[in-house]
Image (cartoon, grey):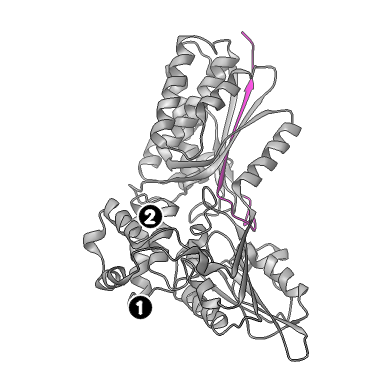
Amino acid sequence: MGGCEFQRDASGNSTAQVGGCQLRQLSRTCQCQQSVYKPTPPSRLSQPGHPVQHVPPEMLLKPHSKIQVIEGAKNNLPDSEALKGAVAIQELTEGLTADDLLLVLISGGGSALLPAPIPPILLEEKEKLTKMLASRGAAIQELNIVRKTLSLLKGGGLARLAYPAQVVSLILSDVIGDPLDIIASGPTAASSHSVQDCLQILTKYNLLLNLPKSVETVLSSSPSKPTAPEDYSHVCNIIIGSNTLALDEAKRQAEGLGYATLILSTAICGEVSRIATLYCQLIRLVCLGFAGLGEGPLSDKVRRNLLQLAAELEIPGLNLAEFLHALRGLGPERPVCILAGGETTVQLQGTGKGGRNQELALRVGLGLHRAQAMETSSTSGRCEIVFLSGGTDGQDGPTEAAGAFCSPELVDEALQEGLDVEAFLSNNDSYTFFSQFQGGHHLLVTGLTGTNVMDIQTILIRATERS
C-alpha cells in the first residue's frame, strides 16, 4: 500500500512525498517520484521484506532517492517493522489540507503492511487472531473483514485521516469480484461491513469465546453500522489491474498458439480438494468428448456431478451450464485450453511446507491418476493433459515457487522415486514433494513478478489419437 502526496509551496512549485508502498508498487512509486517536480523529504515507502537479489532491478529505487524504505511483513505477516511503516504513513497523512492530493497505490499484501490495531489491541494479539483464522480455512474476504474492524487505517481509515485532502487510489485487485473495501482491507474505501459481520466470522470459526480482552473491548465499542459512502466524496478509487484482465491476456496468448480457449471463471474459490475435484471432472468430460463419447450416459453423469459440485461451491458468477454447453462444441481437431482464476483455501492438517497452488496441482495430479485407474474405456489415454496453478505474484505461500504443474502420470512416476503423493498431501507438504520430484522440474519458479491479481489455473488437453 502506498501513496504520493502532491503539494504546492508558496511559489506555486509542485512538491511530493511518497507515503508508503507494497513491493508490487515499488516500480510505480519510482515512476511517481520521477513524474513530480520536487520531492519533499522525508518520503516514506512500506514494502515487504525481500532480499535485494530477489527484487527485479526495475523495481529498485534510484541512487540518492528521497524515498525512505521501510521493509516489513515478511511472508505476508504483519510485524514490528510493518507497524513502523503504518505509523509513518499515518503521520504523513494526518494534517493534510484541502490544497493537497494524496495519491495511493494499493495491491495485495497491503493488509499485512498496514497493521495499526485500534488501542488497546496489541499487534501480537491481532496477528495471532489472523493466523488462527487462516489456519482454520478462512477466506481472504473473511480475514480482511476482521482486520479492518480492528484497524485504525483499514476500512477507509486512511481516507478519513486524509480529509479534506483529495485522495486518488490506483488499485491492483487480488480479491474475487474486486470489492474496493476488501482489497488490502480497503484503506481508502467505505466499508460495506459492520461489526456484526466480524462477529459472525469469529463465531463461524469458533473463536468468539477465546478472544483477548482488548479485542472484546474494541468490538463492543465499534459502530454497529458501516460508515456512510458520502463520507468518502473526497476519494476516487480506480482498479487498474485484475484477474479478469490477466485471464483475457492469457486467452489471447493461448489462441495465438492454436488452442481453442475458454475461460471458466475469474472467481474460483473454495477448499482446495473440492476445487481439484471440479477440475478433474472437467478434464474427464473433455477427454470423453475427444473419444467420441461426449453424448451418452457416462458424459451425462459427469455433467450432473459437475453441476451439483458447482452448486455446492457457490462460485460467484459461475454459469457452469453455459460453460458445459460451450465445451460440447470442442472436438479433437484443436487442442483445448481452459483458463480460470481466483483464490482457493487450504485446511491445514499437517506441518509441511507448501502453498495453495502447489497443493492444488498435487491434488489434481492424484485425482487424474485415480480417474485413469478406474477408467474402463481408456478415454484419458487418448489425451495429453497438463494442469498448472500459479500465483501471479510469483510466490505461493512461504516458498520460492509461484506454483506447480502436473499430469496424470505424476503419481506413478513419483512412486518410482519412492515418493508417496498421498503422504505429502496429508502433511500439507506439497513444496517438499515438488522440490524432490524429478529435481523440482514441475515447480513453477518465476521470481517476484511485481504484481498480484490472485491465482491462475490452466488446463491443456490435446488428443493423441482419434476414435
Q: Residue furthest left?
A: 209
| Disc sitting over residue 134 in the figure | 2
Of the two numbered discs 2 and 1 in the rendering, the one whose residue sits closer to the viewer? 1
Q: Secondary structure at mark 2?
A: helix
Which segment did they paint magenta?
446-467
Query: 12 or 351: which is nearer to us?
Result: 12
Q: Amino acid at mark 1?
A: Pro
Q: 406 or 164: which is nearer to us?
A: 164
Query: If the image is split into quadrants, where does the C terminus sit?
Result: top right
Indicate which disc residue 87 carries: none
In the rendered image, residue 15 lying in the magenta stretch gets the answer no
Q: Position of residue 404 (x, y in %)?
A: 55, 42
Answer left or right for 50 relative to 349: right
The residue depicted at 45 percent of the width and 19 percent of the height is 302
Q: Residue at x 68, y 62 (%)?
A: 56
Can residue 440 be seen here? The reply is no
Q: Position of residue 76 (x, y in %)?
A: 49, 62
Give yes or no for residue 451 being in the magenta stretch: yes
x then y, percent, for residue 411: 47, 30
Q: Secondary structure at mark 1?
A: loop
Whether residue 236 can be seen here: yes
Residue drawn at 25 percent across, 54 percent down: 206
Dot 2 or dot 1, earlier in sequence? 1
Q: Which residue is mark 1?
A: 119
**Which amino acid, by three-letter code, is at mark 2?**
Ala
